[in-house]
Image: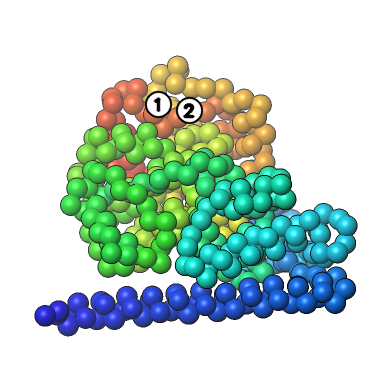
Amino acid sequence: MASGREKRRRAVALDDDEQRQEEAAALLRRIRGLVRWVVAEVGAGRSPSVAIHRYQNYCASTAASPCACSYDVPVGTDVLSLLHKDSHASRLNVLLRVLLVVQQLLQQNKHCSKRDIYYMYPSIFLEQAAVDRAINDICILFKCSRHNLNVVGTTCSSEDSITLLEFLVMGWVRFLEGEKKIYCITNVNAAFSIPVSIEAIKDVVSVADYILVVEKETVFQRLANDKFCERNRCIVITGRGYPDIPTRRFLRYLVEWLHLPAYCLVDADPYGFDILATYKFGSLQLAYDANFLRVPGIRWLGVFTSDFEDYCLPECCLLQLSSEDRRKAEGILSRCYLHREAPEWRLELDAMLQKGVKFEIEALSASSISFLSEEYIPQKIKEGRHI
């Protein structure tokens, strides 16, 4: 016979499932309503138009210049009309095609990737970016997130790539993903896949003291090989470069649910910094959803340009910033959120640009193969050497 606690757990799970089903049914009704309206308008010889808000979570702005950027207030509106012969007509045509696919997914309770959708109408979509934009437009139009559409990403190193990869977690945590047991805690040095659907997570238990996000899978594997989690009560996550939506949602879920501090370890180069900024501030492409994906309290653990001298690394570990690196760094430095919310981060990036050098996390292994896991990370966290 099930215990009272077990019965309550099942009741909560059923309530959550019922709520998700009701939300999906409501979204489906709204989609059907829009499609019927468009068909009726075209049938009557009228030109249907749809208003899509524009969101912007950052811009190029000086410290003294106020801007309109916001995580939840639109900065403008695009009006898309189907019968006008312009780019907006093409954009609305693509949106409607994608919307029909989404309607079918919700009706059948199935999922597919953005790449799957592209190949359904490649002669109309022409490029993956058109599908990506349509999905974003649909999310804005219906005030929902991509997971509500039953559409999964195809990201690995950036939001526009087309390779589906698994993103990893290990450490002192266990949870259920639907009926599947993810018991990292029974083997804290083993890698498990991050759940695609955060809504399927339940019964989360953890005795971790903090969460560590690492940019690269190679660094994740280094920590696993060194049995880092065995000696440090933590949860380690990697998005294998630029994080996808499930990785960011999973991180935010853990931070909020477990009330743990999160630290991020990236290369000392402009692209590492951009990955760090994606976790904290969100991406421009998904600005409409940034407030639900970002982790505002994440702390930058390293690596810093100053670490090169502080840890007496050999000169051969240093690389010169390329012209592309410099352009990237200069573009990031101009982002308004660094002036407003992270001036110390901005100073560190500016120091990198002024010195004209970069280096990778793995350079810390120059003194010892396990220096990163045995000294660098534990000491920095213990001494509070992060920004």
Crowd rating for badge 1 (residues with CA inside 10 Å; few <14, some 14–19, many 20+) = some
| Residue furthest out toward the front | 43
- Tell whether 285 sits left or right of 237: right
Relative placement, left or right, of 154 versus 131 is left
Residue under circle 2? 359
Residue 84 at x, y percent in the picture:
88, 62
User: Residue 37 bears which disc, if any?
Assistant: none
Q: Quadrant of residue 103?
A: bottom right
In the rendered image, the quadrant that contains the N terminus is: bottom left
Marks 2 and 1 close (CB-CB < 8 Å):
yes
Q: Nearer the viewer, residue 81 or 203?
A: 81
Q: Which residue appears farthest toward the top when viewing the image?
A: 316
Above or below: residue 230 compared with residue 292: above
Disc 2 marks which amino acid?
Phe
Which residue was labeled with disc 1?
363
The answer to which of 152 and 250 lies nearer the viewer is 152
- Answer left or right for 87 relative to 238: right
Residue 83, by quadrant, is: bottom right
Question: Residue, x 41% and y 32% (percent of image)?
Answer: 361
Residue 173 drawn at (x, y percent): 26, 57
Measuring from the top left, give residue 217's x and y in whole percent: 39, 37
Q: Is residue 91 above or below residue 36?
A: above
Q: Residue drawn at (35%, 22%), measured in percent from left and top?
A: 366
Observer able to see residue 342: no
Cα separation, mark 2 vs mark 1, equals 7 Å
Mark 1 belongs to which amino acid? Ala
Q: Position of residue 352 (x, y in %)?
A: 56, 33
Find numbered disc 2 in the image and state the secondary structure of the residue it sits on: loop
Q: How is the image coloured?
A: rainbow
Between 373 and 121, the residue placed more toward the observer is 121
